[in-house]
């Protein structure tokens, strides 16, 4: 084999090796990119959800509270709450990288605006100057708590959170507030579409923020089915 043949064979082998090496590096790069994309599939972002509110427990029953000494004798009637509506705007904040082969990530569910209401059907006398809507329950609050997101396949996400709630409420000319409400939440998300199932627990004290007035604690437990978007 002459020198020219040896050189040509060497160049062909070298070229083939370089082409194979480049192809292998490109494959590894693509795999790395795919893993990187998967690792970042669970991302922080804003969400907006709306949907019906279903009162449960004592919130869905008529309640009569009788004030006793040292307060003046008085009877306060809180009609049963009925179906209402909810609008929630918040942000999913993730802390640290995804784990478990990029299928699991931890963070905080911060709902900055939680505006909702529940209707009611009071038994008003025919000559009453009150409107039925004055006996509806209106709320505005915020909710914050730990979040776990699971990414089982593709763009499907499952969010699980436990949040503490703060609510200010108005009902029949009386104001009330709640500091230690709680919520258990599960989101099912695919791409940007969200379906949320919420169970809330808590009480409201309708005493116009006045400690000198009698305590009017009303349970406000609800179940909510919300749909929306996560951006």
Image (cartoon, rainbow, N blue to C red):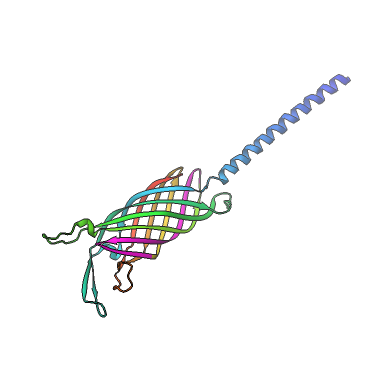
Q: How far across and down, in percent of the image, does residue 23 sit?
A: 68, 32
Q: How far across and down, in percent of the image, does residue 138 sit?
A: 30, 57
Outermost residue toward the left in this view: 127
- On screen, 63 above or below 115? below
Instruction: Choose top left, top right, bottom left or bottom right for residue 55.
Output: bottom left
Q: Is residue 163 magenta?
A: yes
Outermost residue toward the bottom in this view: 70
Q: How far across and down, in percent of the image, does residue 71 sit?
A: 25, 77
Instruction: Choose top left, top right, bottom left or bottom right for residue 192.
Output: top left
- On screen, 96 above or below 216? above
Q: Which residue lies at the image location 29% right of the left edge and 60% below the top edge?
A: 170
181 or 56: which is nearer to us? Answer: 181
Q: How many marks?
A: 0
Q: Which residue lies at the image location 39% right of the left edge and 46% below the top edge?
A: 228
**Is 217 placed left or right of 130 in the picture?**
right
Q: Which residue lies at the image location 44% right of the left edge and 51% below the top edge?
A: 90
**Is 20 placed left or right of 10 in the picture?**
left
Q: What secondary structure is the stretch in magenta mostly built from?
A: strand
**Is 111 placed left or right of 104 in the picture?**
left
155 or 14: which is nearer to us? Answer: 155
**Is 95 placed left or right of 211 in the picture?**
right
Q: How far across and down, in percent of the image, does residue 26 sit?
A: 66, 34
Instruction: Quarter of the image for the N terminus: give it.
Output: top right
Instruction: Choose top left, top right, bottom left or bottom right for residue 76.
Output: bottom left
Q: Which residues are magenta?
A: 153-178
Q: Is residue 56 magenta?
A: no
């Amino acid at each position: 084999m002459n020198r020219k043949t040896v050189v040509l064979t060497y160049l062909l082998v070298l070229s083939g090796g370089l082409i194979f090496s480049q192809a292998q590096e490109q494959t590894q790069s693509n795999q790395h990119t795919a893993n990187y994309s998967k690792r970042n599939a669970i991302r922080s972002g804003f969400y907006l959800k709306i949907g019906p509110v279903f009162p449960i427990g004592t919130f869905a029953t008529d309640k009569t509270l009788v004030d006793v000494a040292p307060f003046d004798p008085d009877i306060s009637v809180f009609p049963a709450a009925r179906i209402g509506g909810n609008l929630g705007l918040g942000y999913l904040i993730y802390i640290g990288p995804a784990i478990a082969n990029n299928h699991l990530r931890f963070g905080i569910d911060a709902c900055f605006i939680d505006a909702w209401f529940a209707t009611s059907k009071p038994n008003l006398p025919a000559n009453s100057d009150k409107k039925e809507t004055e006996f509806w329950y209106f709320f505005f609050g915020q909710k914050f708590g730990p979040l776990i997101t699971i990414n089982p396949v593709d763009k499907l996400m499952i969010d699980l959170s436990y949040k503490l709630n703060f609510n200010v409420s108005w009902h029949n000319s009386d104001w009330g507030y709640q500091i230690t409400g709680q919520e258990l939440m599960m989101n099912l998300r695919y791409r940007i579409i969200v379906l949320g199932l919420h169970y809330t627990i808590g009480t409201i004290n309708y005493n116009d923020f006045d400690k000198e007035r009698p305590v009017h604690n009303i349970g406000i437990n609800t179940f909510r089915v919300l749909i929306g978007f996560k951006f």
